[in-house]
Amino acid sequence: MEPMTTSVANETILRVENLKKHFPITRGVVFQRQVGAIQAVDGVSFEIKKGETLGLVGESGCGKSTTGRTILRLYPATAGKVFFNDVEVSSLSLGAFRSYRPHMQMIFQDPYASLNPRMSIGEIISEPLIVHTSMQEKERREQVEKLLDLVGMNPNYTDRFPHEFSGGQRQRIGIARALALSPELIICDEPISALDVSIQAQVVNLLEDLQEVFDLTYLFIAHDLSMVRHISDRVAVMYLGKLVEVSQSKSLYDYPLHPYTQALMSAVPIPDPVIEEKRSRIILTGDVPNPSNPPSGCRFHTRCPLAVDICSVDEPELRQIGLDHFVSCHLV
């Protein structure tokens, strides 16, 4: 894998327009009928510039991972469009989309479940090369050894199996597999949440180094707000299937505008005991509503400490407030 040239500034690599993914709820043993739908992703729109990292954050179950998987068509979209390098890949047939798969890869959350225990490490990493290239066996093995070395693993480990490695090592193997086809975009689906805290920083630093060398673009999905702040250029905040705020990372963390974002940011610890002791936490009441029957109007109004009458009636649009800062709130 050869380093890529520096990308053109502000060139959009991924654009998502009104993406929806609803999972049907069915009843009946023999004759099943749909009685509802879980609105996991419901009208999400954003774009990612080439070479940048967009962090996607929110509570568990808000639709972050489903968004990433729907973009890559691991889940079929219910509605909406996905553009990759200005090509609408969401409308392509599966055969036509196959040629775009090498350019869009994914690092999965669970390094234990995402690697086939019956395949050696060499077989796991070389599988994309077998499917998408015409490399011969010797060439593939050399490429696998290069990829292992690239992610800080011993190239001689190709004949070993996943159970012989720790969680951090398995995630490095997953990263090597994602890099095998020289992608432009990698969707990182909570790649460090299953790892020990001592290993998380190593994996994030590796991702940053690889991004710099190969000009990679990341959609970094996570719930660790401290890590997202460290790695992301911009951050999108998601709540119950919708984006509520999108902004430059520093702006979002310093001046969060949406009440939900403010609550999330108040939970991020500050490494200064004096400041940490003085600041106040925003504690949200109630539970996250059922995505099969979301609240009317603003979906956050049932837990929002600032909600007024209009919040339960009209759904706010994601509108621009400042330079590259978008928020979905009637009160901002």
Image: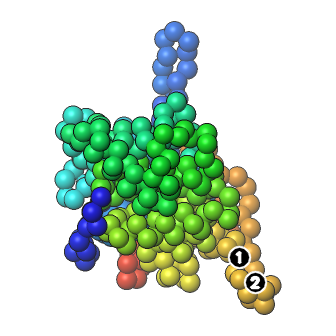
Considering depth in this image, is 190 or 287 the residue closer to the camera?
A: 190
Split into 4 quadrants, where in the image is the N terminus? bottom left
- Label of residue 122 in the image: none
**Quick check: can you spot residue 296?**
no
Q: Residue at x 54, y 52 (%)?
A: 171
- Label of residue 276 in the image: 2
Considering depth in this image, is 253 or 132 the residue closer to the camera?
A: 132
Please state the horizontal and vertical placement of residue 174, each as a whole percent of the image. Answer: 48, 49
| Corner quadrant of residue 281 | bottom right
Q: Which residue is drawn at 27% across and 63% down?
A: 2
Residue type highlighted by circle 2: Glu
**Quick check: can you spot residue 199?**
yes
Q: Which residue is drawn at 54% across and 63% down?
A: 203
Q: Is mark 2 on a helix, strand or loop?
A: helix
Please state the horizontal and vertical placement of residue 188, each as a whole percent of the image. Answer: 46, 56
Please state the horizontal and vertical placement of residue 116, each as a whole percent of the image. Answer: 51, 35
Asked if residue 55 is positioned above or below residue 287 in the image, the reply reads: below
Q: Give the residue pinned by disc 1.
A: 269
Residue type highlighted by circle 1: Pro
